[in-house]
Image (cartoon, rainbow, N blue to C red):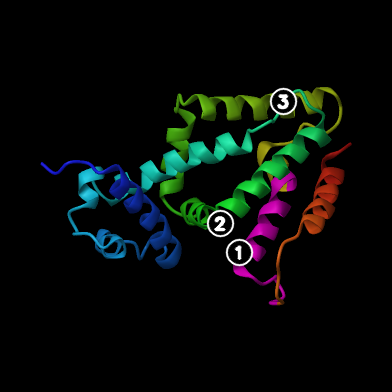
């Protein structure tokens, strides 16, 4: 039995993310992954049962890291404006520091793996994931109780609260806007958009 090599395992995960972003989930195979890593086809199977096991474990591991980063310094008792500002700051910083992971999760969100991830997320006992979910629920509930915003369906809230940020980040990753013009994100643009999103949520 081949021994596990932590460095090689990290290489397999990193190259899996890069390969999925480059070729899409449909074009991702263990053969392509092994070639990208410069290892034999059997090497990824030392760490993962199969392609599905590899993808789902990366989603859970990186998802937990992302949620921990987003939750940094976030107080569910904060006002709608202060709490949402921290969320935008954390999400923006995370996406700027981890551009490939943003594109990787875009691939996941439009695939059959997304539902599996949601089911695993809902039943996950990881303290970071639990804290994030509880904090967001408390934050929204507190904002409604203080009459800072209406009691909106969660999908409507998320679309208004974070949809504009993620759209701008997608333009930034693509390097062009919806018109095809060259596009690069800036702090000024982020916070101008934030004010508009906040205005849309506030009573």
Viewport quadrant of the C terminus: top right
Image coordinates of residue 24 in percent, x first then y, are 42, 63
Q: Distance between the residues labelled 2 and 3?
A: 27 Å
Residue at point 36%, 48% (across, down): 55
Q: Is residue 120 left or right of residue 103?
A: left
Asked if residue 179 is positioned above or below residue 66 in the image, the reply reads below
At label 2, counting other C-alpha atoms closer than 10 Å, the crowd grade (few under 14, some 14-19, many 20 or more) is some
Q: 193 or 26: nearer the eye?
A: 193
Contact between labelled residues 1 and 3, with CB atoms less than 8 Å apart:
no
Q: Residue at x 84, y 54 (%)?
A: 192
Q: Is the magenta stretch mostly helix, strand or loop?
A: helix
Residue 76 lies, in percent from the top left, at 72, 25
Q: Which of 38 and 34 is in front in this view?
A: 38
Q: Real-space Cα distance between discs 1 and 2? A: 7 Å
Q: Is residue 140 visible?
A: yes
Q: Which residue lies furthest to the left in this view?
A: 1
Q: What element carries label 2?
A: helix
Residue tagged 3: 76
Q: Which residue is drawn at 26% across and 58% down?
A: 30
Which residue range is magenta in the image?
160-180
- Asked whether residue 156 appears in the rendered view, the answer is no
Q: What residue did someone put label 1 on?
A: 173
Dot 3, how many residues are within 10 Å of its Cα: few (below 14), some (14-19), or many (20+)? many
For the residues bearing labels 1 and 2, Cβ distance under 8 angstroms: yes
* Residue 99 tag number: 2
Label 3 sits on a secondary structure element that is: loop
Mark 3 or mark 1, earlier in chain:
3
- Sequence-wise first label, 2 or 3: 3
């Amino acid at each position: 039995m081949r021994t596990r090599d932590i460095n090689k395992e990290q290489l397999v995960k990193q190259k899996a993310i890069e390969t999925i972003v480059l070729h899409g989930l449909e074009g991702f195979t263990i053969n392509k992954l092994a070639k990208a890593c410069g290892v034999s086809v059997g090497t990824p199977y030392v760490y993962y049962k199969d392609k599905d096991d590899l993808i789902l474990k990366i989603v859970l591991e990186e998802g937990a890291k992302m949620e921990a980063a987003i939750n940094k310094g976030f107080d569910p008792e904060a006002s709608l404006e202060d709490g949402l500002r921290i969320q935008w700051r954390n999400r923006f910083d995370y996406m700027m520091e981890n551009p490939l992971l943003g594109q990787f999760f875009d691939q996941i969100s439009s695939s059959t793996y997304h539902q599996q991830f949601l089911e695993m997320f809902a039943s996950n006992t990881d303290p970071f994931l639990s804290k994030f979910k509880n904090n967001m629920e408390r934050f929204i509930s507190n904002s409604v109780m203080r009459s800072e915003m209406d009691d909106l369906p969660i999908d409507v809230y998320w679309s208004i609260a974070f949809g504009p940020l993620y759209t701008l980040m997608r333009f930034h990753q693509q390097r062009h806007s919806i018109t095809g013009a060259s596009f690069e994100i800036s702090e000024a643009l982020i916070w101008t958009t934030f004010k508009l999103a906040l205005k849309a949520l506030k009573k």
